[in-house]
Every structure is written in C-alpha cells, then in structure tokens.
Amino acid sequence: MSFTEYFELLFNDYTLRTISLGTAILGAICGMLGSFAVLRKQSLLGDAISHAALPGIAIAFLITGTKETNVLLIGALISGLIGAFWIRGITRRTHLKSDTALGLILSIFFGFGMLLLTYIQKQPNANQAGLDKFLFGQAATLLARDVWFMATVTLVCLLVLLLFWKEFKILLFDADYAKTLGFNTKMIDILITSFIVLAIVLGLQTVGVVLMSAMLLAPAAAARQWTNSLGIMVVLAAVFGATSGVVGTAISASQNNLSTGPVIVLVAATFVILSFIFSPSRGLLFRQIRFIKNRKDLQLHKTLAFMFDIAKRHENISHPHAVKILNNFHGYTKKSLSKLEDKEYIRVEGLMWEMTEKGYDFALNLYNQQVEEND
Amino acid sequence: MTSAQLEIQLIASLVAIACAIPGTFLVLRKMALISDAISHSILPGLVIGFFITHDLGSPLLIIMAALSGVITVVLVEFIQKTKLVKEDTAIGLVFPAMFSIGVILISKNANDIHLDTDVVLLGELAFAPFDRLLIDGMDFGPKSLWTIGVILLITLSLLFAFFKELKISTFDAGLATALGFSPVVLHYGLMSVASVTTVGAFDAVGAILVVALMIAPAATAYLLTDNLKKMLLLSVFFGVFSAISGYWLAHWLDASISGSMTTVLGMVFLLVYLFAPKRGLFSVLYRNKQQQVEVSLLTFLLHLNNHTEKSERHINHLNEHINWQKVRSKSVVDLALRNNMITIDKSIISLTEKGKSFTDKAIDYIITNDDSKIESIKEDFFLFRG
C-alpha cells in the first residue's frame, strides 16, 4: 500500500481513521505535557511511571475480571500515581538520588506486574489473553470510544493548562520565587505530575509500557531546539507528537508485520535528530558553521594585526614589504592574503604587499570594535 | 529439591552477585539509569548477531549485544556533550529508539524463530537447566551457568584488581585524575562490565530483572551503610537472598521466576526503606519530631532567661506569649521539668541552675556559631548532633 492509497483510505476507512486520530491525539497530549517533564528534568519519570502502571492493570483485572480498557486504565492510573509519589518520597526522605529511585521503582513495579501477569496466565478460568497488549501496545485495538475518551481527557488537560499557565510557568523556571509569591507550589507540582501520569496511562494501550517514555520525551526534546519560549515549545511539541503519531501509523499500516508503537517512536526520534542538526540557533550544523567562520575570521584578523605591526613602523603606511616576511607567521596562507586583498585592506603587487588606508584603520580599531560589538 | 531446581537457584544467585557488584558502583555514581538503557538497547545487537550466525547460542550474539550496549553509552554521552538537552533526556531518547529498532527487526524478519520480545523482557529461568553444555557428549551442566560464571569471575577479578581506583574515582573524581587514574578508562571499563553482565544475565533472567538486580540491592544496602565494602557485601547478600526466596515464591505461585525475584527485591527494599535504623522513613520522621520538640524547648528556655518579671513567667501567660497550643506547651514544660531545667512555684516558672547554665551555653553557641561550644550540649541534645 502506498502513501497516496493510505491517504485515500484515511478518509474512507473507518478503522484506520480511528487509529490515526487516536495516535494523533496521543502524540499531541504527550508532546504538551512532555514539554514540562523535559524542562523539569523529569524526563525519565515517564519511563518509570509507565512501567509502574503494569501491576495496576494486572490487579484491576484480578479484582474485576473484566478486560474493559477503562477499568484496566484506572488500575494503571492508580499504580502509576503510587509509583510517582513513592519516587518523590524516596528522593525527599532518603539520600538516594533520583536516578536510583526511578530505576528502582521502574524495575520493581514492572517485575511485580510481570509476576501478576504470569500468575493470571496460569489461572484456569481467566480469559487473560490481551493483557500483554499493554507491554508493546496495539494501536489496532483502539476503538472510537477510546478515541473519544482520549479527546475528552486532552481537552480537560488543555483547559487546566491554560487556566494555570502562569503558575506552571513560574514553578518551572523559578520555584523559589513562586513560593515567595504565595503560590501553593506543592499543589501545582502534584497537579502537573498527575497530568503526566494521566497522559502516560492513556498511551499504554497504543504504544505500550516500554516505549511510552519516548512518546513523552522525543517531541518535547525536538521542540526545545527551535524556540526559547515555553508557549511556542508546548505548541510545537504537540504538533511534532501528533505528526509522529499520524506518520507512524501510516508507515506501519503500509507494511506488513510492523507494529505501530515502535514505528511512531522511530518517527519521533527522526524529528529529534533533524532538530538537533538543523535547528538554526542551537543545531549542530549551524553551530559548526559558525565555529568555522569564527575561526577563519580570527585567522584573518591575526594576519592583519601582524601586518599592522610591521606597517606602523614606517612613516608611510603604504610602504611596500616583501610577502616573504610573512612566511614565518603562523596565521598566514595564500588564501588569507587574497582574502585580505579582496577586502581592500592590502594591495599585493608581485612579491610585495602594502597596507591601504582602510586596512590600517581597521587594524588600529580591531580590538576596540570587538569590545563595542560585545557590548 | 531436584537437581534442576538446585541449578536454577545457583544460576539466579550467580546472576544476582554478578549484577550487584557493578550495580553498587552505578548507584554511587548516580548512573543507575544507564543500566536500564543498556538492558533495553542490547536488543538490536542481539537480533543483528542472530541474523549473522542464525544460532541463538553463538557467542557472537553476546559480543554484538554487549557492543550495542556500549554504543548506547557512547551515544548518550555524545548527546549530553552537545548540551542540546539535559542529561537524563539523552538517556530517555536513545534507548527507546534502539529498542524500537530491535522490535521492528524482529517483527519484520524473525517471525518464525524463537526470539520474541516477551522472552527478551522476561527471560525464562525455568528453562535454563535444559540448555546444557555438551562437550564430546559429556554433560558439563547448564550453559547459562557457565556464561554467568565466567562473567562473574571476570567481574570479581577486575573488582579486586581495581578496587582502590574505582573507589577513589567514584567518590572524588578530581582526586583520582590528579593521582593519575584515567577517569575515562575507568568509566568505560565499568560501562563495559555493566554491559557484558547485562547481556549475560539477561539471557537467563530478562532485561527488567537485570535492572532490578543491579539497582535494588545496591539501593537497599546504601540505606544501611556508608562503607563501600559493607555496601558491596550487603548488596550481594540481598541479591542472593531474593534470588533464592524469589525462586520459591515463584514455585509456590506457579508464576514467572524473574517477576517474583523482583517482587522479593521490592519487598526487601520497602522494609529497609521503612525501618532502616538511621535512614529509614520512620527514623527520619522520628528524628524530625524530636528536633521540633528540642527547638521548642530551647525557645522556651530562652524566653524564661530573657524575662525576670513574674508576670511574663506565669504558666498561663506562656501559652499566650509563645503562641503554642495547650498540648504542646504542656509537653515542653514536662520535658523541661523532667530534665530539672525549671522549677514551678505557684504557677510561676523559673530556671534552675542547670537550666540557666544550659541556656547560657546555647546562647553562646547561637552568638558565636562556634562548633566547640556545643560539644557539651551535644550530650543532652539530639539536635546538635547533626
């Protein structure tokens, strides 16, 4: 199936439309909330929480015996929240660092979840098949109902985000200041963590426990490269997330045997790589170009300064000198000489060079200018 | 107990020891999550190794997997160095991408073979005894026992050879560099050991348990001791304990062995987290409470010291003046009485000699902030013990 066919299908085929819509919404909400996680240096919280949600799913199934997605997700939500707040407790109350706390909760909750899952599988009466889908996610199981549910949650999230935008922002960048202004920072903190947990739980069905953290991080990390404003970053991250969702679904639908979750993650990772390289202000490519340009300018200025030192000892600044005397100078090359000539700082005639008025003035004010520019 | 059961427990215990040693250093170096990243991202290495050899038992698989673990570490560090994102974001970006590549490779090419993602995540310890090492028809025991045994031996010999270097570079990287130990070599050495251990262990117990076995015993031990050697020994002990009791729990529940080992690890951690003598939750809460009482007592004594007039020292007036609730003032007054700091005469409180000298010492300390002044108060007071 080619892409054009896919887009035709997208408007005709009910299932595909549902799934694409679902992954798009998921990408958007994850990008939005992921921005906060990334900026708060809680990137891996998402990973820990998504793993910590697993035992909740298993316990919800053990208690209720249904495979109703919403019931299972409520279980996941509760155990994800327990995991998140236990991590907070460990880092607050003990001297264990946050990385240890995250890794600990992640692996222990996940192991416990797997214990319960295998226990359920061995039960004679249980029609347990389908619980594993939460491990790697199956976008194909998304129903219109699920998508509606996701859309509602996203809307609520968006409303709360807009309502408390100022509070979130100030907590993000200057928590102490927020406290002195009288905001209840603890409540805002809990609110934002709970929303992150909620977004993760929503994604479990689609992307699965293992890859969920990338959904949260990648769009935000990509968006971060393009802007320094929080508002733009959140919007961009949502756009990146939604695009990865749709494109990932398209690619996996156009091939056989390609599960959606990993493809979406790889598409999002591609966004990150592109942003890392091509972002104009922070990207590696432009950074390298600026670096090389600066180095060249510096070489040129060094040569000019050296020439200036020679020229200023003569009464006539345009007194010709042999090119040969530059040979021992480190920054000198033929190329730099002709470049200086292009800029009319010097004139070269045969094997002799002489400084022009313009070059003399420029060299005289070389360092003054730079100070002014920096100011 | 059959010999297969014994072998499973032996393998599990060896894995636990092999993981606990690098795990301790990872936890101390605040790099615990690297183990999580490695355990996920060895998947593409395994798959590619399998495509080359078409043999799940080939040692090339282990080498490829360990290599992709090291590549992950290098990639993470490269991204960190660009300073485009924060440290932990770099980890979170690299390993899901690697893992996705692995999953996609498996689902596209390896549908018909025994290499599925469940096994990768969980491992199957129960089957380990059936995969035996046969040389010339002789039975030398389970293969994974040999793999993990060799890895453990290498880890142990490296630990004994470089213990001093590791210790210094873990606690004071600057000093280690000044003394001429290359932190880069030690860092990558540790990462390689962690990588190889992860791969070797993961064959037996799966990706997640490796992470649990690395972090949980070390974290538990860290709550109990500050001594590196004791911490290593304790984490080995916790690892082996949960390996063996986890096996029996799984046996009883008829569920995944690695899952139940992790659960036992979690319960051990929970117990220590709550009840550890110095760092446990309860003792921290108790200490906070205690300090609160002591500060109140000190405030109370200082108040008495400042006021000579009787009206200020009337027991009812105190309640108003320092603005304490009734219960709290009563407990503070009782505490002071019990320590013979004050006497109460017709509801008028006055300082005793002991109370007076104690207060003077406290004032002295508060004014000068000189540590030597508090040496004598320390005996009476929990608060100043730091």
Image: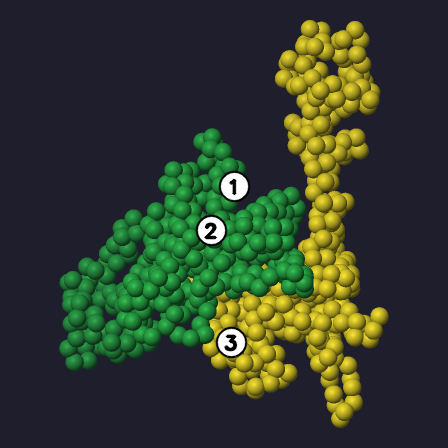
> Callout 2 environment at 10 Å: few (<14), some (14 to 19), or many (20+)?
many
Chain designation of label 1 = A
Residue at the image point whose x is 54% and y is 69% from the top:
B41
Indicate whether B81 appears above or below A188. below
Instruction: Label 2, secondary structure: give it.
Output: helix
Q: Which residue is mark 3?
A: B106
Mark 2: which amino acid? Ala
Position of residue A240 in the picture relative to residue A305 (left or right): right
Residue B114 falls in image quadrant:
bottom right
Q: Position of residue A370 (x, y in %)?
A: 28, 55
Chain designation of label 2 = A
Q: Is label 2 on the same chain as label 1?
A: yes
Chain designation of label 3 = B
Residue at the image point whose x is 37% and y is 50% from the top:
A234
Q: Nearer the viewer, residue A317 or B243?
A: B243
Q: Nearer the viewer, residue A150 or A373?
A: A150
Q: Mark yes or no: residue B346 visible.
A: yes
Q: CA distance from mark 2 to mark 3?
A: 28 Å
Residue B246 falls in image quadrant:
bottom right
Instruction: Label 1, secondary structure: give it.
Output: helix
Q: Which residue is mark 2?
A: A199
Considering every residue shown, the one lying at the far right of the view is B1
Q: Is label 3 on the same chain as label 1?
A: no
Say whether marks 3 and 1 touch (CB < 8 Å): no
State the yellow chain.
Answer: B
Mark 1: which amino acid? Ile
Mark 3: which amino acid? Ile
